[in-house]
Amino acid sequence: MKDELIFDLKQRLNRISPEAVSEMEKHASKIIEHVNLAFCQRKDWQTLIGPNPVEVLYSNHENHAGYIRSQLLIKGAGRFFETILWVYRSYMNRGFMPDYFLAVFPLWQQAISEHISETHASQVNAIYDFFLLYHQDFLKLAKVLSQDIEVEPGLKIFYEKYLNAMLAPDMMMAMQISREFIKSANDITLFWEQVIQPAMYDVGRLWSEGEITVGQEHIATSITQRVMALHYPLILEQIKHDKTILVASSPGELHEIGPRILADILELHGWNTVYTGADTPRESLVDLALTTKADYLCVSTTLPFNLPGVKKLIEEVKIKVPQTKILVGGQAYQGEENLWQEMGADGFAPSASGAVAMLQ
């Protein structure tokens, strides 16, 4: 069933013109305001959003508008479909009623029809027709729990202990677990990829399922950053060659553990690595690629609605710094085998070790 739905979604996305996306972006604030006002005029609006304050509703609508525009531009149907299920699951786990979606989708259609041209509105509203048509299917599929994260059998005990330490939260315990495993620089790659990364994925899953708060998620990130900093002196001791690689989260992207893992593992393999962290503006990344004479730029993206910014970045780097090759990765590319090519990148790696192998 999923394959059939994704195929239908892909067909609808392909019929949306760049002009329609541009008009959506131009009138985004008016469309969002229209939906907010119309929704809150319903007598049952508070019931539909459950215990959530109205500010959460407004924030969700703003995020929805940005995400929809990005997907109309990128047209990654597989990833788009998985995100729909994630939205259904996370909203309902936080108290939104299933009928919220049936109530709000027609309001988006009304707002779009009022604020952009008829031809373009019909193209975009076909996506909301898709949402409404398959609403019951989304409800069923959203109830399917995420698959367990795969961890090497010998490392599962460390992964479980580390996850529990982050959720406790217990900073000292997390550091002790890392010390038990990491005895030399050779142990870092395995711990980063088989303990820290899957544990952080699990934290994100628990947040989406309403099991932990955003505060707990932030604490887990803070603990991991300190654990990684604890062992960084071992990475600094490694001999570096003359190749320079620039590693960054994409513009607008606040998730930085993934690219930091990549930067550390690249350094372990001798790369002269420049790591910029989260949400580095496009102009700054282009300038850094130029000033550092970077051989490669690696860009990590977790949230799909940041992909249009990555595409603009790639286009600008290829014009201004053509000698710098661009490698992309991150969860935003899951489910879209050839998306990296459509973005204009020179390569894609699903993991830090995969990136090292590709670069070598």
Image: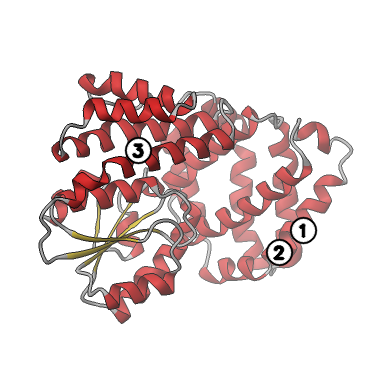
| Residue 134 position within the rendered picture, expressed as x and y whole percent measured from the top left | 59, 36
| Residue 72 position within the rendered picture, expressed as x and y whole percent measured from the top left | 52, 58
Residue tagged by mark 2?
A: 29
Disc 2 residue type (three-letter): Ser
Q: Nearer the viewer, residue 245 or 231?
A: 231
Q: Nearer the viewer, residue 128 or 233?
A: 233
Residue 203 placement, left or right of 60: left
Q: Quadrant of residue 97?
A: top right
Residue 309 placement, left or right of 288: right
Q: Which mark is residue 227?
A: 3
Q: How is the image coloured?
A: secondary structure
| Residue 65 position within the rendered picture, expressed as x and y whole percent measured from the top left | 63, 55
Instruction: Indicate which label's residue lies in the foreground, 2 or 3.
Output: 3
> Residue sitting at 14 percent across and 49 percent down?
357
| Residue 52 position within the rendered picture, expressed as x and y whole percent measured from the top left | 74, 35
State the SS at label 2: helix
Q: CA distance from mark 2 to mark 1?
A: 6 Å
